[in-house]
Image: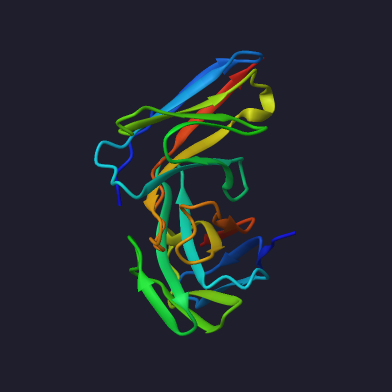
Amino acid sequence: DVKVTQSSRYLVKRTGEKVFLECVQDMDHENMFWYRQDPGLGLRLIYFSYDVKMKEKGDIPEGYSVSREKKERFSLILESASTNQTSMYLCASASPGRTSSGNTIYFGEGSWLTVV
Amino acid sequence: LAKTTQPISMDSYEGQEVNITCSHNNIATNDYITWYQQFPSQGPRFIIQGYKTKVTNEVASLFIPADRKSSTLSLPRVSLSDTAVYYCLVAPTGDDKIIFGKGTRLHILP
């Protein structure tokens, strides 16, 4: 069974802290994604990686960075957490060029981050 | 990427058929249409995908008219457990950057 695992389900961090959200997939997918989801705003793409050490900005990259040192692992980093980054964060993976031809994008369960 | 437009929310009753329409006026020749379902506190999951005419699986049907400028997800005889957000996604084969819209929040009433 395919699996995307996010390391933390619930986190509470203080303003200014550095936060790491980890994601691991076991499907040997080249592409990995980080989204955030807020009420009324749907899923918004933060960053996307199409290969190890490769990344591309999504729609809302400000305040975030990412790391992809190994194919199976994609980390989202909040260098200095702020209260407006309180949200649910979703990691996903997919095979390249196949999300629209039969294969699909797979999501993790989500990480709920609260910044106080 | 083709922009999609869906209703923000819909209500229906148990046992009824629900149809959710997605507009994608600038769909390109090689674009496929995919629908995802998201339950509260979970990530979205794939429901159905199509290119033209009609596709049916054990969960839903997808109707795509000849001009492909819209598509309709049809859920037969819904139950309370079908309450979820449904996303329509239009993307070409080979497009790796996946952008979701705001989806349609479907609320099933008893």
Residue B27: % across, % down: 29, 42
Furthest-right residue in view? A1
Q: Nearer the viewer, residue A70 or A104?
A: A104
Corner quadrant of residue A45: bottom left
Furthest-left residue in view? B26
Side (left or right) of A109 relative to A104? right
Corner quadrant of residue B77: top right
- Residue displayed at 63% across by 34% down: B57
Side (left or right) of B57 relative to A54? right
- Residue displayed at 53% across by 65% down: A95
Can residue A16 be seen by looking at this rendering?
no
Residue B102: % across, % down: 40, 41
Q: Is the image coloured rainbow, by chain, by secondary structure, or in one colour?
A: rainbow
- Residue displayed at 52% across by 69% down: A14
Residue B106: % across, % down: 53, 27
Q: Is residue B50 above or below residue B80?
A: below
Corner quadrant of residue B13: top right
Side (left or right) of A16 relative to B79? left
- Residue displayed at 59% across by 57% down: A106
Q: Is residue B108 above or below residue B22?
A: above
Residue A94: % across, % down: 54, 63
Q: Nearer the viewer, residue A84 or B1?
A: B1
How many numbered badges does the structure rendering display?
Answer: 0
Can residue A72 be seen by looking at this rendering?
yes
Q: Is residue A36 above or below residue A20?
A: above
Q: Quadrant of the N terminus of chain A?
A: bottom right
